[in-house]
Every structure is written in structure tokens, then in C-alpha cells.
Amino acid sequence: MKALILKELGQPLIVSDTDDPKANGGIIVDVKAAAMNHRDVWITKGMYPGIKVPIILGSDGVGLYQGKPVIINPNHNWGESEQYQSSTYHILGLPTQGTFAGKVRVDADKIRPKPEHLTMEQAAALPLGGMTAYRALMTRCQARKEDRVLISGVGGGVALFAFQFALALGCEVWVTSGSDWKIAKAEEMGAAGGLNYKTADWKSFGKQTGGFDVIIDSAGGDGFMNLVKLCNPGGRICFYGGTRGNISKLNPQIIFWKQLSIFGSTMGSDKEFNDMVDFVDRHKIVPVIDSIYTLEGGNDAFLRMEKGLQFGKIVFNIQ
Ligand SMILES: NC(=O)c1ccc[n+]([C@@H]2O[C@H](COP(=O)([O-])OP(=O)(O)OC[C@H]3O[C@@H](n4cnc5c(N)ncnc54)[C@H](OP(=O)(O)O)[C@@H]3O)[C@@H](O)[C@H]2O)c1
């Protein structure tokens, strides 16, 4: 089969022919489309624990199994608790071989029929980002229709799903981004408004919006304190990433006085994966595709994500 392979950390990816995976008690899916996550970029730079090369990256995929279109749940060994993952939890695409290839081996209980309203590329965009956004917004923050929601960095894959899910709930949703054009796109999709975090006047944004009941963030860093200040009494903030690094300035008084809840969240359980796909099916949500590449264009795709040029998911069409 053809695959996009990371042979050495920090080096360009290589497309080459390699042996088909063996089922080893699982099943083999003929991959038709796969999508990127920032995790794939972090791995090429060695910024993930337990990396072994060579490896085929890719956590998101759809394909054919016994001739039928299926979507893949990237979880391995989430475990028994809905509260947290087991100590042996891992995600398709490291350490197991991923979806940027003609075939992938998965456990038989990790596939389900592809939602019919989605193309292969749209469905491939969904699993990891959709599941992470669903758990952060629905399970951790318990978002409801009455909540005013802020999605920070809306250009990101997970952030955009959280945005679409909050809109589907009927919430008033605001966004931040480092690009005005991404804010404009979010407004076209239904955002009440947005703020550029690079040129932000956070105080007047708070006055303009009336503050937020739920905030979803993946940046962390010192900017996180702005989000705490924007939170209404009883508000919930959830972060699933730390792109901007440690949060060194956190004011405990604001947090306890406003009775805020701050959650960390990672991926989601198998139940949440299924709930998320059901939710997408029920609301006929269509993931936003930024661009579609062939495996041969893999390095361009990775560069696009690294530079943060995308709005929506970067997808591989795999023949
Ligand atoms: N815990 C988990 O299970 C989990 C799952 C998925 C992802 N993640 C992590 O979450 C992060 C995003 O992943 P992704 O795949 O969605 O990445 P992505 O598609 O590459 O998006 C990167 C995001 O970073 C945002 N950003 C950059 N600087 C920011 C700032 N100062 N303030 C607010 N937002 C900022 C970008 O917003 P704009 O483009 O709008 O400026 C964009 O949303 C990564 O760190 C990733 O490792 C964690």
C-alpha cells in the first residue's frame, strides 16, 4: 500500500510503498480519506512522548470495510471510567500505525457507519477534533442553550467543531482568532461577533458581549487570565490544549469569587465518540474543510497547519 511515512524526526515526510497491515485480531479498513490534527505536527517535531520512527501518522480516517463506508474512532483502551482515560490509553497514529495510508488496522468495535449526509472528506474531518470538542463543551462544561459561549482560536480544528456544536445547541456564540478573516468566516457561519487576540481590547469586549458562561480554549499561556476575567459568575472554562504554554498569571480571587469552574479535557470516551457522531447526524452538521491534499502533497499540508493558515480541517484524499 501507499503511505505517508515519518522516517526521521524533523525531516520531511516521505510517500512510499510499504507492507499492508496485518489484522492481528482486528480488521483492515481501506482508507479513502484522512484528516490532520495538530498532534501530527507536534509528533514530527518530537514533541510527544513515546515516539518511535518510522511511523505512519494520522488519527482521523474514513474508508470502506466489507464494501461499506465507515468512520473510525481513534481511541485505544479508553477504559472503564467516563471521568478519565486508562493508563494504557493511546490514539491511532502513535504508537500504532495511522490513517495516512491506503489501509489501516483497527479493532472491530472502533468503526461505525459513516453519517450519510457527509462526503468521505467531511466525515474524515470529524473523529478526533469532533470528539475533543464534544467532551469539552458538552460533558465538561455542560453547555446549554441559555449559555453565552466563547470559542478561542476559532481557526483551529477542534475549536471550529466546538463552535459548530454550540451553534447547534442554540447558544449565542462569540469567537476569538489571530486573523480577522477567520472571525469574518465565523460570523458568516453564525457567530455573534469576534475579537482578534493579537490586537484585543479585552475590557471593551467584556462590556460589548456581557461576558461568557462557557469558554473553550486551547491556547493557555498568560492570555488565559483574560478569559477568566471574561467569565460570568458561575461560568465554566475548559481547555484541551496549551499552545501558548504555561499559565503563570492566574488570580485565585477572581476564580473563587465568581465561583468559576476550570476544566482540563482530553479526547473522549467511546461513548462520547458515538454521542458526538449521533449529534452531528441529528443536527446535520457539516465539518468545515480547509483544503484537500493527496499523500504526495503531505509536506505542504503539514506546513499549512504549522503556519496556522487553515480555517477548518486539512484532509487527505487517498486513492
Ligand atoms: N487534549 C486533547 O485531547 C487534544 C485534542 C486535540 C488537540 N489538542 C491540542 O489543542 C491544540 C489545538 O489543536 P488543533 O488540532 O485544533 O490545532 P490547529 O487546527 O492547528 O489550531 C491551532 C489553534 O491555535 C489557536 N491559537 C494560536 N494562538 C492562539 C492564542 N494566542 N489564543 C487563542 N488561540 C490561539 C489558533 O487560532 P486561530 O487560527 O483562530 O488564530 C487555532 O485555533 C493543540 O495544542 C493540540 O495539541 C488536544
Image (spheres, rainbow, N blue to C red):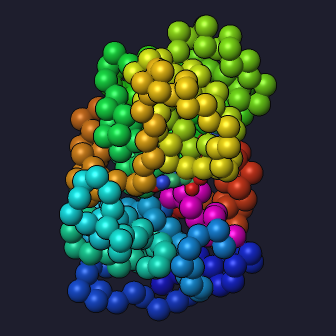
Q: Is residue 44 left or right of residue 60?
A: right
Outermost residue toward the front?
A: 253
The image position of residue 106, as x and y in percent, is 32, 75
Outermost residue toward the right?
A: 199
Question: Which quadrant of the view contains residue 45?
Answer: bottom right
Q: Is residue 188 left or right of residue 98?
A: right
Q: Residue at x 58, y 65 (%)?
A: 40
The image position of residue 51, as x and y in percent, is 57, 79
* Magenta-drawn segment: 35-45
Q: Which of the pair 237/192 is nearer the observer?
A: 237
User: 93 above or below 71?
Assistant: below
The answer to whether residue 190 is visible is: no
Magenta span: chief secondary structure:
helix
Is residue 94 shown in magenta? no
Q: Residue at x 54, y 57 (%)?
A: 37
Q: Which of the pair 22/306 is nearer the observer?
A: 306
Q: Which of the pair 75/82 is nearer the observer?
A: 82
Q: Residue at x 65, y 84 (%)?
A: 7
